[in-house]
Image (cartoon, grey):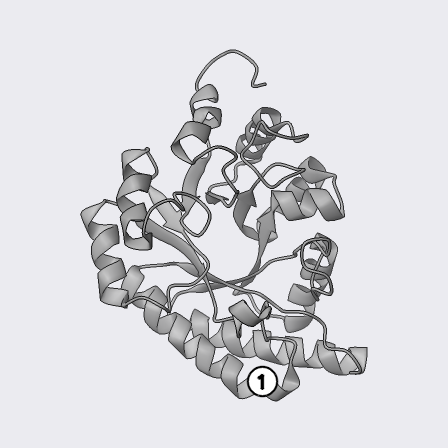
Amino acid sequence: MPRFAANLSMLFGELNFMDRFKAAADNGFAGVEYLFPYAYDKNELATQLHENGLQQVLHNLPAGDWDAGERGIACLAERKGEFQDGVGRAIEYATALGCPQVNCLIGKTPTGIDADAVRATVVENLRFAAEKLKATGIRLLIEPINTFDIPGFHLSRTDQARALIDEVGSDNLFIQYDIYHAQRMEGELAATIRNNLSRIAHIQLADNPGRNEPGTGEINYRWLFDHIDMLGYEGWIGCEYKPLSGTTEGLGWIQALHTTEPAL
C-alpha cells in the first residue's frame, strides 16, 4: 500500500494553516507536504510536525512572486542571484523540518530569449542547487506541469525532465511525477512510471478532469496504486488535489483501498 502524504496547501483549506497539521494526523496521514514554508516560522512548523507525529516529506524552493503569477524562476537568467539565495533559504527550512527533498518549479519560459540561452540558465541553476542540496543530504526534484493549467510552463513532459537530468549530470536530481499533470500532457501513466522509476523520487496525485480526489474522474487509481506497489516504489505519494466536497468527506477513496470491492 502506498504511503500517502497530505498536501496542506490543498487539503483542509477550511482551517488555518497551522491547524491543518493536526487535522492531517487525525485523518490518518503520517506525512505532509505543501507548496512553501517561507511565510511561517520554521520552528513553529517543526513544532507542529513533532506534536502531531508527522514527517515533512516535501516543499518547494522559493518560486518568485506567486501572487503575481510567477511559477518559478530557474529559467530566468536575470534572477540567478535570487534563485541561489532561494536555495540557501530552502536548505535552512528543510534542515529545520527534517525534509529530505525539495522541488524546483522551473517557471514559465521567458519570451524573446533564445531557447538555447534559456536552457543554459536552467541547467546552470539546477547544477548549483543539486550540488548545494547534496552537501546537506537533501534531494532536488523537478516537476513537469501541464500547460493547460499553467500556459508557458517550461517543463511539461517526463521525457523532457529526464533529458534535463541527463544534461545537468548530477546524481542528486530526480523527477517529481505528478499523475494529474502527466495524465493531461501525455497519458501512458503505468508505462512512464515503470520506465522512469529509478529517476522518480516523489509522486503526487489528483484525478482528471477537475483535479479532485481519486475516484472522481477518469484515472483507475486502484489499479495504478497496485501497479506502483508491484514496481517497488518506496517513496511517498502526495495528495495534491482539490477536495470536491470537503477534505474529510472526500477521504473515502483511501478507505476503499482497504476493501476487496473495486473502487468506483
Q: Residue at x 53, y 11 (%)?
A: 261
Q: Is residue 153 above or below residue 87?
A: above
Q: Quadrant of the C terminus?
A: top right
Q: How many marks?
A: 1
Q: Residue at x 51, y 46 (%)?
A: 240
Looking at this view, is 206 or 177 the one in front?
Answer: 206
Q: Is residue 138 above or below residue 158?
A: below
Q: Is residue 80 above or below residue 138?
A: below
* Direction top: furthest residue: 261
Q: Residue at x 23, y 62 (%)?
A: 44
Determine the secondary structure under disc 1: helix
Q: In this rendering, would 185 be left or right of 227? A: right
* Local crowd size for mark 1, using a 10 Å CA cut-off: few (<14), some (14–19), many (≥20): some
Q: Position of residue 58 (x, y in %)?
A: 43, 56
Q: Position of residue 228 (x, y in %)?
A: 57, 34
Q: Position of residue 134 (x, y in %)?
A: 44, 70
Q: In this rendering, would 148 be left or right of 252? A: right
Give the amino acid at mark 1: Arg
Q: Quadrant of the N terminus?
A: top left
Q: Which residue is mark 1?
A: 79
Q: In this rendering, would 80 be left or right of 9? A: right
Q: Position of residue 181 (x, y in %)?
A: 66, 48
- Which quarter of the figure has residue 212? top right
- Which quarter of the figure has residue 149? bottom right
Q: Residue at x 32, y 47 (%)?
A: 20
